[in-house]
Image (tube, coloured by chain):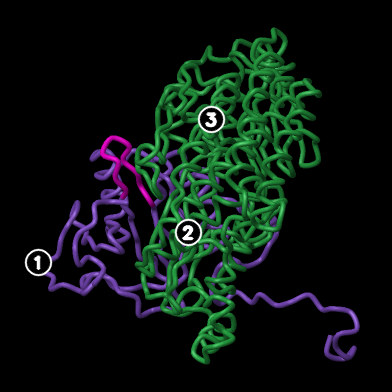
């Protein structure tokens, strides 16, 4: 087995693609295995799950993407159609692969966030956070209280921003083009604040091992509260524009259904898992930072369709606003990063007066800091689900192995299940409801 | 995020007699996280056992190439090999995580696939195959997932030559 697999995958033109029925093993076909990311047994045994009259030899395999405007980047989905009904499908990915895990092995722990922040470019704070938490766990250090609360503040704002962008693209994909403009408009408010804090609109490199890069700017409380006050009524407008709108509901309700068992078996997390009725949110169930000290609700659905995934994200923006308002009250004074000369650079003022500080500054920026040998896996709840970082350290200033568990990468596996039996016109709504970010899928 | 045990960070190889076992495989603790080290033969049985224990969710699976870091700390009864397959399992009921690390030898980088148990591991195993060349026996569709199909080599291996793209005018023509 190992030998022919070994040779087979070296050069195998077309092997990644969805194979036609003639080329697919009948047993594999029956189990929708091999060519398709597998459907669960029970589902396949129900032969009448797709109500379409099969005219064998007339199914057609078509490509959607990688350059389709509503595949959110460079996602390519191959679909087998019987008439307009989708039978099998397979996401083909890798068009945005830039070897970021390999790059990560060549960057020091201080440079690491600049790399990982580019993975999920719509919620960069979360990848930085999981990287920083993993490094801190390896170093066994505690960051100051203020840094923890600042991290919670910026990640919750980032969650709002990411979901607002989902509102925009989901609306656009389904045909509510005005929604796109509104979503971008509100997202801009959050972007403007994060730009004020970090200096950048995206790819912040703000959360670093040991704390955050800079303190919050003067007047940040007013800015954040104004931003929340501006966005909250707009969410009610979204409700009027989309949630209560007949066309939008007909396009999304009952479309792309996934059951609890399927979502769990396929390791789906985030809004996809919650839309099936499982109240799994790492912030609530396995709290990190200080999420056990704040009040918020986990939004769950019931039917697992595209509409519920939309509704969950919309209400998660409201929960994030609720969280941000609590966090604003709770951010304590103090240091925004750890004052440990082995991990964080010394304050600028100290460099002028202390030779030792200058040496530490020089050492940290040229060589980086050494991290004790070991390996950890640290997950956080990103807007798309469980975002985990697995780091192996060999005691040098660079990670020996950096692996990021991207929620979009895993969630894409649910596409064949969601698309099966639906019509091709709904494929766009289904792909949109998964909300994949290809930067994170392909890394 | 398993329950932390005091002094677990030491990772000191304990004598085999007092070694903690889980489904017959030695257990170690890494920064308070529980790690199980089954052999390749035990792997499927241990994962099956863990699934029965409630670890019904596979959150992550990846490979690691330990070519240049062979002196890592492992339980005394585990012989280090070049490759490792690392699976992170999650029990939602117990709110606990466990990590399974399997040693995979360089000369026969094959390990059993867990796709039958965790269909969600399919893409992850394909990624491990693509990036490190670890073959998963019983995987339904073991093809490259991130790299192009006709790519040669496995980029995350430590001996993979990263090379560089020649930049125009940077080197004399004969060196290019």
Q: Is residue B91 magenta?
A: yes
Chain A: its colour in the image is green
Tell me the distance, in whole angstroms, between the alpha carbons under discs 3 and 1: 48 Å
Q: Which residue is mark 1?
A: B18
Q: Which residue in the structure is indicated by mark 3?
A: A316
> Tag 2, which chain?
A
List the residue tagged with mark 2. A2
Q: Quadrant of the C terminus of chain B?
A: bottom right
Crowding at dot 2, Cα within 10 Å, few <14 / some 14-19 / many 20+, comes out as some
Q: Is residue B130 left or right of residue A278?
A: right
Q: Earlier in the sequence, mark 2 or mark 3?
A: 2
Please report the residue visible at 52 percent of the width from the left and 77 percent of the height from the top: A346
* SS for callout 2: helix
Gap between marks 2 and 3, in whole Å?
46 Å
Up-down: is A376 above or below A304?
Answer: below
Residue A1 image label:
none
The CA span between labels 2 and 1 is 36 Å
**Residue B138 in the image: x percent, y percent?**
44, 47
Q: Provide the chain ID for the residue under circle 1.
A: B
- The label nearer to you, 2 versus 1, is 1
Q: Is residue A430 visible?
A: yes
Nearer to us of marks 2 and 3 is 3
Would residue A4 be counted in the magenta stretch? no
Dot 3 falls on a residue whose secondary structure is helix
Q: Position of residue A34 (x, y in %)?
A: 55, 39
The magenta stretch spans which residues? Answer: B88-97
- The residue depicted at 28 percent of the width and 35 percent of the height is B93
Q: Are marks 2 and 1 on the same chain?
A: no
């Amino acid at each position: 087995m190992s030998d022919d697999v070994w040779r087979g995958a070296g050069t195998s033109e077309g092997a990644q693609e969805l194979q036609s029925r003639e080329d697919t093993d009948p047993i594999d076909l029956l189990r929708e295995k091999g060519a398709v990311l597998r459907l669960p047994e029970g589902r396949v045994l129900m032969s009448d799950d797709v109500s379409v009259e099969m005219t064998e030899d007339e199914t057609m395999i078509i490509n959607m993407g990688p350059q389709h405007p509503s595949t959110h980047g460079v996602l390519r989905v191959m679909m087998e159609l019987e008439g307009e009904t989708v039978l099998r499908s397979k996401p083909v990915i890798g068009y945005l692969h830039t070897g970021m895990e390999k790059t990560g092995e060549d960057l020091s722990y201080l440079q690491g966030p600049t790399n990982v922040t580019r993975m999920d470019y719509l919620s960069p704070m979360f990848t930085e956070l999981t990287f920083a938490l993993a490094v801190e766990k390896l170093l066994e250090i505690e960051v100051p209280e203020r840094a923890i609360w600042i991290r919670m503040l910026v990640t919750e704002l980032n969650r709002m921003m990411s979901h607002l962008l989902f509102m925009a693209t989901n609306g656009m994909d389904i045909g509510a083009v005005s929604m796109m403009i509104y979503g971008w408009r509100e997202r801009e408010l959050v972007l403007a604040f994060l730009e004020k804090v970090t200096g950048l609109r995206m790819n912040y490199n703000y959360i670093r091992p040991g704390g955050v890069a800079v303190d919050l700017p003067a007047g940040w409380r007013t800015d954040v509260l104004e931003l929340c006050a501006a966005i909250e009524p707009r969410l009610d407008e979204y409700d009027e524009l989309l949630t209560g709108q007949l066309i939008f509901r007909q396009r999304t309700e009952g479309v792309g259904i996934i059951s609890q068992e399927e979502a769990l078996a396929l390791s789906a997390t985030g809004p996809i898992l919650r839309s099936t009725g499982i109240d799994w949110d790492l912030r609530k169930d396995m709290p990190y930072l200080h999420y056990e000290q704040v009040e918020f609700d986990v939004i769950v659905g019931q039917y697992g369709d595209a509409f519920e995934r939309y509704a969950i994200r919309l209400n998660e923006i409201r929960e994030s606003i609720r969280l941000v308002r609590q966090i604003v009250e709770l951010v304590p004074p103090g240091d925004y990063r750890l004052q440990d000369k082995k991990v964080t650079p010394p304050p600028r003022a100290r460099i002028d007066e202390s030779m030792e500080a200058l040496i530490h500054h020089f050492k940290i920026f040229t060589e980086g800091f050494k991290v004790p040998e070991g390996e950890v896996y640290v997950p956080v709840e990103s807007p798309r689900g469980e975002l985990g970082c697995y780091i192996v350290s060999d005691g040098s200033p660079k990670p020996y192995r950096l692996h990021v568990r991207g929620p979009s990468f895993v969630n894409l596996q649910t596409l064949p299940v969601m698309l099966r039996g639906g019509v091709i016109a709904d494929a766009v709504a289904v792909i949109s409801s998964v909300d994949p970010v290809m930067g994170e899928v392909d890394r | 995020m398993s329950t932390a045990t005091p002094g677990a960070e030491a990772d000191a190889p304990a004598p085999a007699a007092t070694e903690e076992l889980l489904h017959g495989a030695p257990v170690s603790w890494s920064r308070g996280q529980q790690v199980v080290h089954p052999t390749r033969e035990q792997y499927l049985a241990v994962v099956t056992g863990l699934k029965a224990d409630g670890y019904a969710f596979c959150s992550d699976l990846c490979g690691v190439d330990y070519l240049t870091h062979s002196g890592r700390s492992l339980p005394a009864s585990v012989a280090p090999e070049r490759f490792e397959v690392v699976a992170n399992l999650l029990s939602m009921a117990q709110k606990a995580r466990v990590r399974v690390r399997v040693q995979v030898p360089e000369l026969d980088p094959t390990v059993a696939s867990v796709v039958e148990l965790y269909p969600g591991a399919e893409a992850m195993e394909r990624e491990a195959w693509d990036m490190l060349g670890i073959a998963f026996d019983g995987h339904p569709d073991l093809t490259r997932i991130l790299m192009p199909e006709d790519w040669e080599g496995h980029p995350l291996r430590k001996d993979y030559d990263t090379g560089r793209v020649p930049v125009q005018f940077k080197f004399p023509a004969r060196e290019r």
